[in-house]
Image (spheres, rainbow, N blue to C red):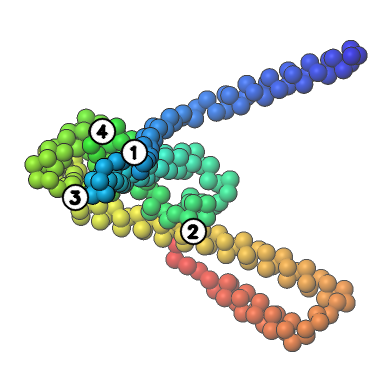
Amino acid sequence: MSAAAARAGDDRASLLGRKNRVVKQETAHLPVYTPQPLPDQPERIVPERYTGSDAERLAALETALDEVTGRATELIDRAKTWLDEQRGIVLREIRDAGLYKVKAHTFEEYVRDRWQMSRPRAYELMEAAPVLRILSGIPDTRPSVSQALALAPVLEEHGERGVRTVVEQGQALTEETGKRVTAKTYREIGQALGLGAQEDGDRDQEQRDSEEHARNESAGRKLHRARELADQAQRLADEAREEIAAGARPLQHGQALDDVSALRRVGNYLRAYKPEL
């Protein structure tokens, strides 16, 4: 190897080293999430292992299938909770860091186009994620997004201990009545304990505020898009005018006349366009 080639190799290695250090510095501030592992799947049923009379085998196989069905249902619920938690965590990071701007003008547009999700649903998942992480670590719970949203104010005001207190009371109520706790149950328990759970009216107001914010964001996005289309229309019309001035003639003369008339109408409309912002 020549001395020049060796120096070139050293230069490339030095450059790569500097790039790696820059990448590490730029990403050092990003939080590192460690998703909780999903539970193992239930053991498979092997029919040949069940012996006895036909009635005994039938009863044993039915019992085994009932147990597996219950276990599988639990796994599905836990997997859905895990997925909702991860969605909320990642979407919050994408929103807070402004990463959605790589693909869209607004966060609403990003979640709609990339994840087929409405803006209110995305915000629900982001609000619910920290609570879902706590609930998924509490035995004998089947948490949902609606339950997590009911407990979100408790977490904000009283921390994890407050959430666990409400959940423990809910579990005690379930043991006493045999009824499964719901989001409404958690809200009622939180209110009874003075732990700041939201009233239904507060939740309704929050929903109205969220919908109003979505409308405001949508109006701004549409105005921005309309401006882009107007700029594009002006550029194309100018190009067509220059070509016509140079001697070009549209093949569909009648259509061209209609297009010019439509452009004039749009121009008159835009000149008078003054929305109350």
Q: Earlier in the sequence, mark 4 or mark 1?
A: 1
Mark 1 and mark 2 residues within 8 Å of each other at the beta carbon: no
Inter-mark Cα distance, 4 to 2: 43 Å
Residue position for label 1: 49
Dot label at residue 184 = 3
Q: Earlier in the sequence, mark 3 or mark 1?
A: 1
Secondary structure of the residue carrying numbered label 1: helix
User: Disc 4 vs disc 3: which is toward the camera?
Assistant: 4
Secondary structure of the residue carrying numbered label 2: helix
User: Disc 4 vs disc 1: which is toward the camera?
Assistant: 1
* 210 lies above or below 39: below
Mark 4 and mark 3 residues within 8 Å of each other at the beta carbon: no
What's under tag 2, amino acid-wise? Gly
Q: Of all residues shown, which one is farthest toward the right?
A: 2
Q: Earlier in the sequence, mark 4 or mark 3?
A: 4
Q: Is residue 4 visible?
A: yes
Residue 148 image position (x, y, % from top left):
28, 43
The residue shown at (36%, 58%) is 211
What's under tag 4, amino acid-wise? Ile
Q: Earlier in the sequence, mark 1 or mark 2?
A: 1
Q: Earlier in the sequence, mark 3 or mark 2?
A: 3
Residue position for label 4: 138
User: Disc 3 vs disc 2: which is toward the camera?
Assistant: 3
What's under tag 1, amino acid-wise? Arg
Residue position for label 2: 220
What's under tag 3, amino acid-wise? Lys
